[in-house]
Amino acid sequence: YYSILLEPRSLGTCEIFQTLLAVRTGDIMPFVVFIAPPSLHALRRQKECAGQYNVKDEDLKSILIQGKHLEQVIFSVL
């Protein structure tokens, strides 16, 4: 078994898409685990629990939008 960890912070959407296409062959069918960001309220609570109290709503919404976009890209490949 092999494992590849793709983190959105280190790779762009295009690189993740290309990596998924490259490893998906007739012999290899990747098992993809996508962990979506939580709701806006839960995300704010997580940031506050981590001591990050000055996070703007725009920043949190950006995280949610990026997560939704990444989810669409991943599931379009599968």
Image (cartoon, rainbow, N blue to C red):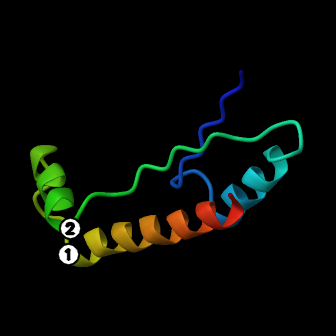
Instruction: Relative to 30, say whether 3 is above or below.
Output: above
Residue closest to the far bottom: 58
Residue 57 position in % (x across, y down) = 20, 75
The answer to which of 39 and 55 lies nearer the viewer is: 39
Instruction: Relative to 53, say whether 57 is above or below.
Output: below
| Residue drawn at 51 percent across, 54 percent down | 9
Residue 40 position in % (x across, y down) = 20, 67
Q: Which mark is residue 57?
A: 1
Give SS at disc 1.
helix
| Residue drawn at 10 percent across, 52 percent down | 48
Which class describes the residues within 10 Å of circle 1: few (<14), some (14-19), or many (20+)? few
Give SS at disc 2.
helix
**Left or right: 78, with 38 as reference point:** right
Instruction: Relative to 49, say whether 36 is above or below.
Output: below
Name which quarter of the figure residue 1 lies in. top right
| Residue drawn at 36 percent across, 66 percent down | 63
The answer to which of 58 and 32 lies nearer the viewer is: 32
Q: Decide which of tag 2 and tag 1 comes sooner along the chain.
A: 2
Mark pair 2, 1: CA separation? 8 Å
Is the C terminus in the top left, top right, bottom left or bottom right quadrant?
A: bottom right
| Residue drawn at 53 percent across, 65 percent down | 70
Residue type at the position of mark 1: Asp
Asked if disc 2 and disc 1 are in contact, CB closer than 8 Å, the reply is yes
The residue singled out by tag 2 in the image is 40
**Left or right: 57, with 63 as reference point:** left
